[in-house]
Amino acid sequence: MAFLQKEKNSYSRIYIEELRERITPIIENVIKPNAEIIDKTGQFPRENLLALAKEGWNSVTLPEEWGGLDLGYVGLSVAAEEIGKADASTGLVYAMHVGAAQAINIFGSDDQKARWLPQIRQGSLGTFSISERATGGHVWYNVSQAEREGNDYILNVEKSFTTSGGQADFYIVSTRTADSVDKKDHSFFIVDGHDEGIEAKPWKALGVRGNHSGPIRFKHVKVSRDDLLPAEILDVLNGTGGILGLNAVWLGVAQGALDAAVTYVKKTVHRDFNKSLAEYQVIRQKLAEVKIRITGLRAWQFDLARHLDELRALNKPLIPFASEIQEHKVQATELADFAARVAMDVAGGFGYTEGVFERIYRDARGGIPMAPSNNLAREQIGKELVGLPLELWEKEK
Ligand SMILES: Cc1cc2nc3c(=O)[nH]c(=O)nc-3n(C[C@H](O)[C@H](O)[C@H](O)COP(=O)(O)OP(=O)(O)OC[C@H]3O[C@@H](n4cnc5c(N)ncnc54)[C@H](O)[C@@H]3O)c2cc1C
């Protein structure tokens, strides 16, 4: 394929469209045809992930040194949106994986990078294991605690949700710091996904059925001190840009819903007046509303992605933008939900029957409770707005 844009220029629409063209064959030939079967059977999207790994998309943000495409958060935004358009389950697995890989790439020691990153290009899959039932979406606050064993650590941890649970090759696991009495002292470990102490339970949920986000137990799992990430990480989801990747998936889900709705209303004709659904103004108005909101959200997605890339290039932390990324998360997930509802509405009774519209409708709902849940995000954004303390990561007095 001949590309016009010879150099990376994330401000160029041509460059971004060329990245889309680059990933399109995988979406069309592998991910799209698998979407329905993944939803029906709950099968993990292994084939999709291997196809993405083969072309380097699973290492989209990693430097070339580790076999990565080095396309930054702009590249991640393109890939996650395109995957989300075709299949939200694969999108979530993908975005969590890229975030987990970034946890090592950004925060890991040279030794951790050398041991964990080269395998990613070969298909090794990562994820975050953070949420605990006892504290719900307050993910900065685990009740489990690591124990010391000589120089190493023992994890006895139960997590309420973990995407790619039982499937991942490595987990970034959070837990309270060993020996600490401060409840907010947390440690992040890189855990080998093949440890025999890991027990993942099935994922039984309304949607995103292929993403295996069920409960998981790390039972007496021994982790070497060499796999403890540095103590200064406070917020691994925002510190790695992990949420921005998920937001791009929800943007893609919204676009996928709109595309399916447009196709349906153009081809569906009422034979009494020989009018297609597209000829009804009310339907066009609803679809136009979705399109307008998608266009706005996409511009914001790329603005944030460029900014995170800029911060990385300057070796600056991403955390100061957590609040804006939460605002974006609320809009992206609620737009996916809105677009899915509109798509089902314009597709009438046929939209409600088994098929693409009801699948997207169920899938789209998944983003709203994901951390930061939209109610919690609004709470934090509102507190920040009026100058109240966020109570995140604050040490006990
Ligand atoms: C599809 C999916 C994939 C997931 N993948 C992962 C993963 O890979 N790794 C992982 O660690 N976790 C994962 N999670 C967990 C997720 O990120 C959230 O932490 C979890 O869903 C929220 O916890 P909870 O269900 O206990 O809800 P709760 O936190 O108990 O929330 C219940 C309700 O209260 C609201 N609420 C909670 N706290 C506040 C507050 N302080 N102020 C106002 N309202 C509040 C919530 O918005 C919600 O409406 C996943 C969840 C889903 C649905």
Image (spheres, grey):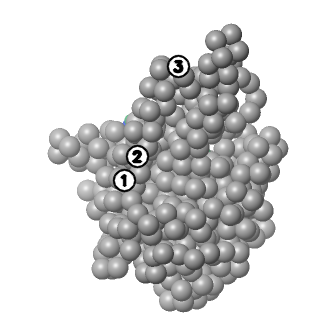
- Is residue 69 something that shows in the picture? yes
Mark 1 and ligand 1: say if the CB distance to the nearest ligand atom is below 8 Å: no
Q: In this image, 45 relative to 114: left or right?
A: right
Mark 2 and ligand 1: say if the CB distance to the nearest ligand atom is below 8 Å: no
Crowding at mark 3 (Cα within 10 Å: few <14, some 14-19, many 20+): few
Quadrant assignment for the N terminus:
bottom right
Q: In this image, 94 relative to 299: left or right?
A: right
Quadrant assignment for the C terminus:
bottom left
Give the residue drawn at x 32%, y 73%. Answer: 310
Residue type at mark 3: give it. Answer: Tyr
Give the residue drawn at x 43%, y 43%. Answer: 294
Residue type at mark 1: give it. Answer: Ala
Give the labeled residue for mark 3. Answer: 280
Crowding at mark 2 (Cα within 10 Å: few <14, some 14-19, many 20+): few
Which of the pair 218/102 is nearer the observer?
Answer: 102
Give the labeled residue for mark 2. Answer: 295
